[in-house]
Amino acid sequence: MNTEEVAERLVQLCQNGNYHQAYEELYAENAISKEMDGIPNDETHGKKAIIKGYDQWASNIQEFHSGEVGEPLVAGNHFAVPMFYDITFKEGGRHSMEELCVYEVLDGKIVSARFYYDTSGIPKA
């Protein structure tokens, strides 16, 4: 798949709530995921570790109120996707979160994912 096809597939899977499938299908084995500086475990290496981190995050969700995944903007071997979530966590309460997700694609797989969002409302560890 080229970058545009990977971007469209990621958006399709995320819009349908199939995040696990997106990781399994689209991420390279050696992918890197980078959260905002200061967030615990802000950098994760390897698809298995990224999926484990997602599972830990998702297991803390008490209620998923709403979410939106926007259309991708593709430039070369990168693409960006805006996302919005309104979630109540088991620990930490309810949070609305807007983020811009930026991905790099090589050989038809996501090799890096970088997430940009406001950290001011996130409780410090």
Image: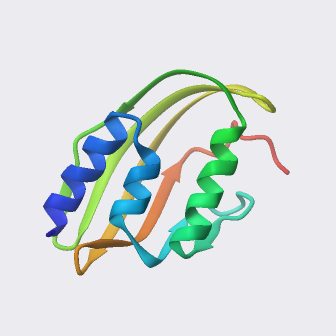
Q: Relative to 112, is 72 above or below?
A: above
Q: How many marks?
A: 0
Q: Is residue 100 left or right of residue 52?
A: left
Toward which corner of the image does residue 53 lie, by quadrant? bottom right
Report the quarter where the N terminus lies. Answer: bottom left
Q: Relative to 2, is 21 above or below?
A: above
How far across and how far down the image is residue 4, in percent? 14, 60
How far across and how far down the image is residue 13, in percent? 31, 44
Toward which corner of the image does residue 104 lie, by quadrant? bottom left
| Residue that protrudes farthest toward the right in the picture | 125
| Residue that protrudes farthest toward the top in the picture | 65
Tell me what residue is drawn at x 16 percent, y 72 percent.
76
How far across and how far down the image is residue 49, in percent? 62, 68
Tell me what residue is drawn at x 14 percent, y 69 percent.
2
Tell me what residue is drawn at x 66 percent, y 65 percent.
42
Q: Is residue 8 left or right of residue 87?
A: left
Q: Is residue 84 left or right of residue 55?
A: left
